[in-house]
Image (cartoon, grey):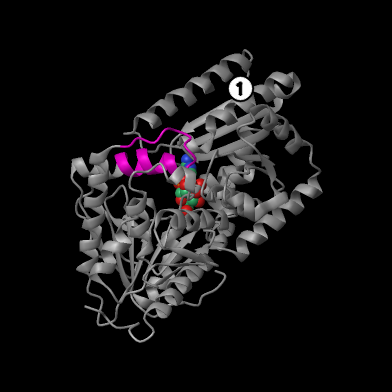
Amino acid sequence: MADATVPTRRPLVVVANRLPVSQDDDGTWQPSAGGLVTAMRPVIEEVGGAWIGWDGGATGVPDRVEGFNADLHPLPLSRAQIQGFYYGFSNRTLWPLFHDLIRTPVIERRWWRSYQEVNRRFAEEAARIEVGGEAPLFWIQDYHLMLAPEMIRALHPASPIGFFLHIPFPPPELFARLPWRKELLRGLLASDAVGFHTARYCDNFRRSVSRVIPGAEVDGDEIVLPEGRRVRTGAHPISIDAGEFSELAVDPETERELADLREQFAGRHVFLGVDRLDYTKGIRHRLEAIELLLERNPALRERFAFVQIAVPSRDDVKEYRDLRTSVETEVGRINGRFTEPGGDVPVHYLYRGIPKPQLAAYYRLADVMCVTPLKDGMNLVAKEFVTCQDAGEGAGVLLLSEFTGAALEFGADAVACNPFDVEGMSFLMETCLELEHADRRDRVGRMSARVRENDVYRWVADELSLIEEGAAARTPEGSGTRGT
Ligand code: ADQ
């Protein structure tokens, strides 16, 4: 952990689409393994607090779980709300619009009404929170809840409120297509601070505000609203718990998995893809590039394997079901084309989430990690890969799309690619194999050092500081007291 300082003394209330807990096969509940939850743990441990999230349809979610010092507030949603708010407005309107229209966003008024209704449900739950006498700090996460800051502000006028967007914020000309652009911006601007992964997304947001909200002005990193209130904006790239991944990479279980994989793939260059099965991740383009690579290099076919691990995602949405069909058709086609009688297939496709030690073993095994999204807010897979490689003293190459937030942090140490240029990407795959071992090892070392320096604890600390600063500037006399 880079910095153990907790930048707030207030109770922390996280408002997010999902709760920070998951259920084991034997039915027991425990804190989830994701980066956000891990990063929040030490802060919540110190200051205490609460977490509001959709229950995901589960029953019997407990009020507390061992090892996580927060009250859980599970919200049940109706079938209609899940369809309208989650699958509809969040994932078929906002998700494609914010990812540069890789698919066409669907505009449906009933989904918008459902989004408003569910955001209000979250805000009303927030109003019920009792965490001692002090005004809590509300930290709202992601595109599902962009109206919540304004709704919570109406109920908790004195509290610091912050929002973080985990996906890109689109350029103003794309954002302008949304009929409810003004309402969403007003929702966000009730926060004291709005955080993004990169300076570009931050700038896109500020430019949208100055176009859409009459009288709003941009002053450096701040937005000045017509009533004089200032809203801070900041670019804080999310990251991983680098220490945890370094340990995981050399854990005995990981080593056992790795030994098996090394035996299975002996004598072959292993290319790897690890993604949620999402059309933003560029899996189709990646497969096409691999096909071109094999077409051009008959000699490589015997010594090559591409492993694609795809975790199922949003399979209630048509675009995602269609994507699965097209990826699986493509995998079958490539394997049909290049597999020799008695030989192994070139593409190994796993459609599932895999346990962490196995994931770390694949990261260590890979000669080339293909992180080639068409658009991605940050991309944590890239950070997990370089951390695991470095811990295992590996020299794997990161082939990284320039349209990811992570590309800004890794610069020229990754092999930068434009995934829309499929043929170009197939040539870069060859380049990756041609780099000298010492060069590859140095690149891994530098990228991993950057992840260690800017780990997820730093992200939490930077975000909470920005929110506290914004709130202090708004109510110097009132901060720390409950306003209602
Ligand atoms: P995601 O789109 O989900 O996140 P990403 O940042 O890559 O993308 O995180 C995926 C996580 O899932 C990683 O921790 C990875 O290890 C795990 N994962 C993926 N496939 C897996 C598999 N088959 N088995 C097991 N684990 C798997 C959104 C944004 C990103 C942003 C994050 C955090 O789209 O741009 O980086 O939020 O803000």
Query: Which is more toward the observer, 342 or 316?
Result: 316
Question: Which quadrant of the structure image shows residue 66?
Answer: bottom left
Which residue occupies 40% across, 67% down? 225
Is the residue 443 above or below the residue 481 in the image?
A: above
Which residue occupies 48% across, 48% down? 172
172 displayed left or right of 229 = right
Query: Which is more toward the observer, 383 or 127?
Result: 127
Which residue occupies 51% across, 69% down? 462
Is the residue 396 above or below the residue 387 in the image?
A: above
21 displayed left or right of 310 = left
Residue lying furthest top = 341
Q: Residues within 10 Å of mark 1 (few under 14, many from 20)?
A: some
Which residue occupies 60% across, 14% down? 337
Query: Which is more toward the observer, 47 or 309?
Result: 47
Residue lying furthest bottom = 477
Q: Work out which quarter of the rendered image holds the C terminus and state it.
A: bottom left
295 displayed left or right of 378 = right
Residue lying furthest front = 215
Magenta stretch in the rendered image: 87-107
Q: How many marks?
A: 1
Q: Magenta stretch: residue 90 in it?
A: yes
Query: Which is more toward the observer, 453 or 29?
Result: 453
Q: Which residue is mark 1?
A: 344
129 displayed left or right of 282 = left
